[in-house]
Image: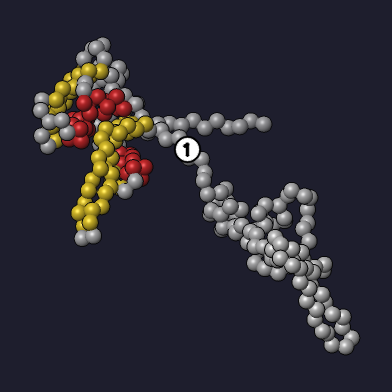
Amino acid sequence: MSEQTTQTTAPQGQSAQVRSPRPQGGFRPRPQGSRPPFRRSGSFSGGPRGPRTGAPGQAPQGGNARGGFRSQGRGGQGGGRSGQGRFQERRPSEFEQKMIDIRRVTRVVAGGRRFSFSVALVAGDKNGRVGFGMGKATDTSLAIEKAFKQARKNMLTLRLTKTKSLPFDVNAKFGSAVVSMMPNKGRGLIAGSSARVVLAFAGVKDVTAKYHSGTKNKINNAKAAIEALRTVAYKHGEAPVKKVEIKAETE
């Protein structure tokens, strides 16, 4: 392929510009003094880039390392109303929890089927307080959170003996589940199914629990155990309040 040169005629007072020959590779060198092509970078919208301030390798003042500017929320840097960022450390809960049943539930609607998760759990502090809750949501973590909130709302405070046992025999029935609990001296916790989880998270010791029904429904068994413990629980507003001592700081 032969090299070709083109000449242009310019009016008087101006010099004619001659284009450089194009090599075989198809690359044409950029003439001196011409502006380089614009490349979009970060949140820069256009126009010539101004001088960069600050030490090399550092983000410009008011922006991030990629050249853009991050908007601040109501709480200050990083957004959030509290001013400490979006994610904060949660305080450890005084209650422990354990799932006793999780199921995937299907609901038929006009457009098809909708799936969700149903969670049943027991929460307690292992010191006389226990509760049962259920939650349903499209996500398992959200369902667990709902169940835990319901368990805290339905928390029972039990009247236990000095040895963390029941003061007398109790019986209860919920649905088809029938359970009986009786104290035993020094034999430990003897129970099965959901009753063992409920009694363990309540902190009860030296108790024997037995189901007299043939049902294996964990939810009904747990509710029957809760109803049995309700007979030895404090009524609303009668539970003793723990005294908290506040020590004054001395300089």
**Which percent across, then down, holds residue 97?**
34, 33
What crowding class fits label 1: few (fewer than 14 Cα within 10 Å), some (14-19), or many (20 or more)? Answer: few
Q: Split into 4 quadrants, where in the image is the N terminus?
A: bottom right
Residue that sits furthest to the top in the current view: 186
9 left or right of 240? right
Q: Split into 4 quadrants, where in the image is the C terminus?
A: top right
**Which percent across, then down, holds residue 107?**
21, 51
23 left or right of 157? right
Residue 7: which quarter of the image?
bottom right
- Look at mark 1 in the image and give the residue it sits on: 91
Choose between 20 and 183: the one closer to the eye.
20
Choose between 176 and 170: the one closer to the eye.
176
Residue that sits furthest to the bottom in the current view: 12
Q: Is residue 42 visible?
A: yes
Residue 30: which quarter of the image?
bottom right
**Which percent across, then down, holds residue 186?**
26, 11
Q: Is residue 134 visible?
A: no
79 left or right of 109? right
- Residue appearing at x 51%, y 40% in the figure: 89
Residue 160: which quarter of the image?
top left
